[in-house]
Image (cartoon, helix red, strand yellow):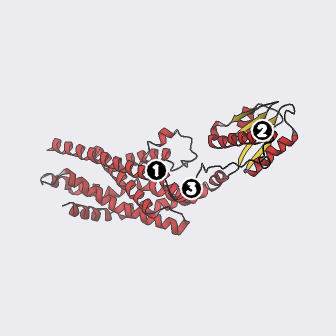
Amino acid sequence: MIRYLVKNNIKLMSRSAVNILLLLIFPLIVIAVLSSAFDDLMKSYESGDITAGYMVIDDSVSEEMVDAFVDAAKDNDMILYKYPEGDPEELIKNNDICGIVVFDEDSYTLYRNDDKKELSKVFEYFVNAFYENMAASIMGIDTGSVSVKVNRPSFLPAIDSTDYYGIIEVVYFAWNAIICGAGIFISEKKNGINKKFQVTNVSETKLYLGKLLSIAATVGPGMLITSILTVLLFGVHWGSPLLSILLILASTIAATALGLLVYYICENTVATIILVFTIVWFMGFYGGSFETYMFSSHPQWIKILSPMYHVNRALSELSCMGRSDYTSGAVAYCMILAVICSVLAIAVNSVKRRTKA
């Protein structure tokens, strides 16, 4: 019976093929616009240089030590600016640097930029390492000359705007999967299909799965086709193909379940599309669909509430690093969301059906 329902629902959706085509084409248009618009911004973040400053109070350290400090910074891809005077915190704010070290008579004070925590921590480690090497040199311990080499982890994944938005926007539009279900809903209302099913012994679960599987079976492969087009048209680098496919399909199933829950609650096609679009927009806003999740200022606890954040991050890290700790969590989040929405949708429809009977 479920196979018959899925087959029939796919036929109904094919009558509104424009909805399906638009869902496949719109991601390509948005990718082209956003990848171009944010290209320079993403490149600015890809730079590995750390920009910081230093200040010397009353010639408290020798010129040789300052030169050694600056040279060591250059060896570690750090750009240092000398500030003769001023308030360190104001200088950090006005010059957008990750920190300032102030050399005093027999000590130093480090001021960090809280908005650049990762880079400022690297700078702090560099300053500490430099002083340890300098102290060892003064005490006569052979350090092989006073040189400091800081191994910096890559805090920000190296991914360009084309790869990022080429991946993220496919996920974003997959979460609007319910648009393709409009053909089913309209035909059911027009032909009174729901009333016909009420006199049969077909369970609510089977009717629901018939819609869920048909929409997912249409949108899922469609999004995979769009993903292939992003490679051919824009040269987008997807990560592990199998894991990427799994994440897209999981997103599609969760999105379909969410859309069906909304439809079963309001029973209006237009209202459903508007509500789902609004929900997805907010999830995308906090999940990195418009502002990259790597550089967004939203609190982390808000980001992790969005299932799109987990999927976006997993796919982005697969693309630029070949692995991601978010993959299993993203799939689990989508599946749990799909199960919860499905149970609620079936329950809501069962109650409404008994009420109308």
Q: Residues within 10 Å of mark 1 (few under 14, many from 20)?
A: some
Front one among 348 and 115: 115
Residue type at mark 2? Ala
- Gap in angstroms between the C-alphas marked 2 and 1: 43 Å
Residue type of the residue flagged with mark 1: Tyr
Q: Nearer the viewer, residue 104 or 207?
A: 104
Nearer to us of marks 2 and 1 is 2
Q: Looking at the image, can residue 232 be seen? A: yes
One can see residue 22 in this view: no
Q: Residue at x 28, y 48 (%)?
A: 342
Q: Position of residue 147 (x, y in %)?
A: 77, 48
Is 41 or 132 nearer to us in this picture?
132
Which kind of residue does numbered mark 3 sit on? Leu
Counting from the top left corner in percent of width and height, residue 157 is at 58, 53
Q: What residue does disc 2 label?
A: 135
| Sequence-wise first label, 2 or 3 | 3
Considering the numbered disc 2 on the image, is that residue within a helix, a strand or a loop?
Answer: helix
Q: Which quadrant is home to the C terminus?
A: top left
Q: Secondary structure at mark 3?
A: helix
Q: Secondary structure at mark 1?
A: loop
Which residue corresponds to the image point at 32% horizontal and 58% vertical from the top-left?
215
x and y percent of residue 217 in the render? 33, 62
Please name the residue that numbered disc 3 is placed on: 34
Q: Earlier in the sequence, mark 2 or mark 1?
A: 2
Q: Residue at x 47, y 62 (%)?
A: 240
Q: Residue at x 74, y 37 (%)?
A: 100
Dot label at residue 148: none
Q: Are marks 2 and 1 in contact (CB under 8 Å)?
A: no
